């Protein structure tokens, strides 16, 4: 895929170190994602994948360098502004899905919209959009009335995908979402994710240990291709 002149994500000369035990540090000279591009990011355990995602999502900010998302310099925003910006622009899918077990399926899906008025407007009417996503993701009608904690793992996964996609954020970030799944469930999950992100024109950055998933993505990147890591001596 040709590189777009206006990437949806751009890290430039980024340096970050965790303070305290271990002092793990990461340097990312140049990493970008084009709009609607899908990238699989591979790396060993401890190679800094989650640290990189924390920088991309603005949970932490670089000591040096910059992170831009959709043209906004994330590290120039206050912590509160970054939280709101993340809710507006990034759909997040976590390894353990992080659903609220006692809340209903539709409330779980609508959760990110509470902090993201523009995304909420794009999703309006919210209940109808959430229901439509459930149907498209193959969740049976009865399930949408259930509490998230009562769903099967496969159903929870679908709810997590719907929550990331609602309101069409331009960037979807998925942190090892298939690690707990068997091969056929992985395949089904990726089918859902790709169909939906392509339909919405969102870019997808997915982190995994599993190189076998690579065929489906526009680009496959190793952490060691884009980042150098350091660890302070104890
Ligand atoms: N919250 C934190 N506070 C301090 N150090 C941290 C924190 N999170 C991560 N680290 C450090 O960063 C290093 C890299 O961890 P990270 O979770 O980014 O790697 P990873 O590639 O995502 O690993 P895994 O695949 O096992 O999840 C860790 O070994 C740890 O020393």
Image (cartoon, grey):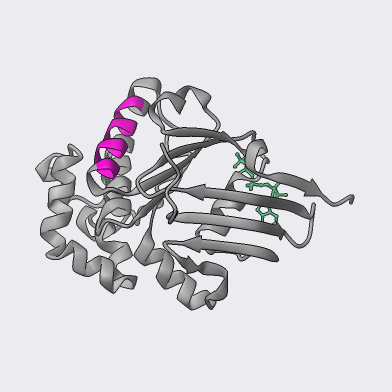
- Point out the residue furthest to the right here: 233
In the displayed structure, 214 sits above or below 139; it is: above
At 46% from the left and 76% from the top, the residue drawn is 81
Q: Does residue 179 appear anywhere in the picture?
A: no
Q: Residue at x 24, y 59 (%)?
A: 167
Q: Is residue 156 visible?
A: yes
In the displayed structure, does residue 171 sit left or right of residue 82? left
Q: Main secondary structure of the magenta part?
A: helix
> Residue at 30% across / 70% down in the picture?
114
Determine whether 179 is above or below 92 in the image. above
Residue 47 is one of the magenta-drawn residues: no
Q: Nearer the viewer, residue 92 or 6?
A: 6
Residue 195 sits inside the magenta stretch: yes
Locate residue 208, reporting x and y percent. Answer: 51, 35
Q: Position of residue 77 (x, y in %)?
A: 52, 76
Relative to the observer, which residue lies in front, 6 or 113? Answer: 6
Q: Nearer the viewer, residue 194 or 157?
A: 194
Q: Which residues are magenta?
A: 187-198
**Residue 234 appears left or right of 176:** right
Residue 207 in percent (x, y) is at: 50, 40
Q: Is 155 situated above or below 100?
A: above
Q: Total of numbered circles in the picture?
A: 0
Pick the quarter of the image with the N terminus.
Answer: top left
Which residue is found at the position 59% from the left and 44% from the top? 49
Residue 21: percent from left, percent from top = 79, 56
Q: Nearer the viewer, residue 170 or 12?
A: 12
């Amino acid at each position: 895929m040709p590189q777009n002149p206006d990437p949806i994500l751009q890290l430039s000369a980024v340096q970050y170190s965790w303070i305290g035990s271990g002092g793990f540090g990461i340097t990312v000279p140049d990493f970008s994602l084009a709009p609607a591009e899908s990238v699989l990011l591979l790396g060993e355990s401890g190679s800094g994948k989650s640290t990189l995602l924390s920088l991309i999502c603005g949970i932490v900010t670089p000591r040096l360098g910059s992170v831009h998302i959709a043209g906004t310099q994330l590290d120039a925003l206050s912590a509160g502004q970054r939280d709101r910006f993340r809710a507006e622009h990034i759909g997040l899918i976590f390894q353990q899905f992080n659903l609220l077990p006692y809340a209903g399926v539709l409330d779980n899906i609508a959760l990110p919209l509470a902090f993201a008025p523009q995304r909420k407007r794009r999703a309006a009417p919210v209940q109808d959009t959430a229901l439509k996503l459930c149907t498209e993701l193959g969740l049976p009608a009865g399930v949408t009335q259930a509490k998230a904690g009562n769903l099967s793992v496969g159903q929870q996964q679908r709810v997590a995908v719907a929550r990331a996609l609602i309101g069409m954020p331009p960037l979807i970030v998925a942190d090892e979402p298939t690690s707990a799944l068997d091969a056929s469930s992985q395949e089904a999950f990726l089918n859902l994710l790709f169909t939906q992100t392509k339909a919405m024109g969102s870019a997808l950055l997915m982190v995994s240990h599993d190189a076998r998933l690579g065929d489906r993505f526009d680009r496959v990147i190793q952490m060691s291709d884009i980042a150098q890591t350091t660890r302070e001596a104890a």
